[in-house]
Amino acid sequence: MSVGAALDAVRRKLGPRKPRVAIVLGSGLGFLADEIADPLRILYRDIPGFPEPGVAGHKGELVAGTLENVPVIVQAGRFHLYEGHSASVAALPVRVFAGLGIDMLIVTNAAGGVRRTFRAGSLMLIADHINFMWRNPLTGPSEPGEERFPVMHEPYDAELRALARTVARESGIPLEEGVYAGLLGPSYETPAEVRMLERLGADAVGMSTVPEVLAARARGIRCLGFSSITNPAAGITGGQGDRPHPGRGHQGSPAQAVAVPLHRFLTFPLQPFTLHACHMVVGTRARRQRIATLFTVQPSRVL
């Protein structure tokens, strides 16, 4: 795997475009790529080292363009460790984004709810994570520009999270906050494992996100993360949990995760930096449920 070869290929495709924010789309959120203005689509098969995604709900492309006139690049299709990929491959797109000079990484995922008050449709702001994947993309020789021993006391930017909470509170928008546990998968967790995660302080559980954030923080990139809670984890409700597929989001499943329409997820005026996360809708076979709308955050630090 060569970060340089992948970066060169993406740069050639981008031409004069200079994205400032990267967004990694979780299961069921691939349609957000269609919201980008003036889109340039780069297929994974045209990028050295990028495998084709093997999970439903994950496209295989990068999409560069603008959201509210701000240059962004969207990763539509993750590489999961449970597919047999190494942590370095899972983090390869983020390393490419770092080479492009992005200032901020937004990660999203669909997750099972460990916290007992979570219901399908809850939106959780990620405060921290626990790496139960037992893999780290930073092992081995350091990549150029990465810290060898990055400090992880604040993997998800505290200022961005505080501002998101303030705006959510002032707007009367339900927004939870908690710890995301990343597991290797692909099997779902047993009730005993869920009880263990609960006792260790996890609030949600999934099979992604952690490698990307580790790589981003090694480059000093600010991270903001959201988990869409699609179902209670096994044992929380006394049953097996409502599990659609390994990404916890699948069209037509009993717990259809993070479905359309997502009218406008993020906009980013850069000075002052503003984030709007708007109208994310979750659906089930019985009904659709709005789980999030409008965040506006204006950090004092300029990206």
Image: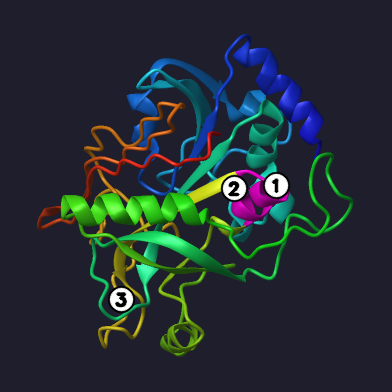
Q: How many marks?
A: 3
Q: Which residue is mark 1?
A: 89
Which residue is painted at 52% across and 32% down in the image? 21
Residue named by callout 2? 79
Q: Is disc 2 surrounded by few (<14), some (14 to 19) or many (20+) residues within 10 Å?
A: many
**Residue 32 percent across, percent down from the top left:** 35, 33
The C terminus - image quarter: top right
Of the image marks 3 and 1, the number of the one nearer the N terminus: 1
Secondary element type, mark 2: loop
Relative depth, front residue between 171 and 39: 171
**Where residue 175 sits: x, y (%)?**
27, 60
Residue occupying the far right of the picture: 141
In the picture as drawn, the residue positioned furthest to the left comes out as 286
Q: Residue furthest front?
A: 300
Residue in the picture at 61% in, 9% down:
16
Query: Which residues lie in the magenta part?
Result: 211-221
Residue at image location 44% in from the left, 61% down from the top: 126
Residue shown at the point (80%, 60%) measured from the top left: 149
Q: Amino acid at mark 2?
A: Phe
- In front of the other: 298 or 223: 298
Residue 78: percent from left, percent from top:
54, 45
Regarding mark 1 in the picture, which secondary structure is present there?
Answer: helix
Dot 3 crowding, Cα within 10 Å, few <14, some 14–19, many 20+: some
Q: Earlier in the sequence, mark 2 or mark 3?
A: 2
Q: Is residue 165 magenta?
A: no
* Residue designated by label 3: 241
Give amino acid for label 1. Answer: Val
**The N terminus appears in which quarter of the rendering?**
top right
Q: Are discs 2 and 1 less than 8 Å apart at CB?
A: yes
Left or right: 57 as drawn, with respect to 196 = left
Magenta highlight on residue 217: yes
Mark 2 vs mark 1, CA separation in Å: 7 Å
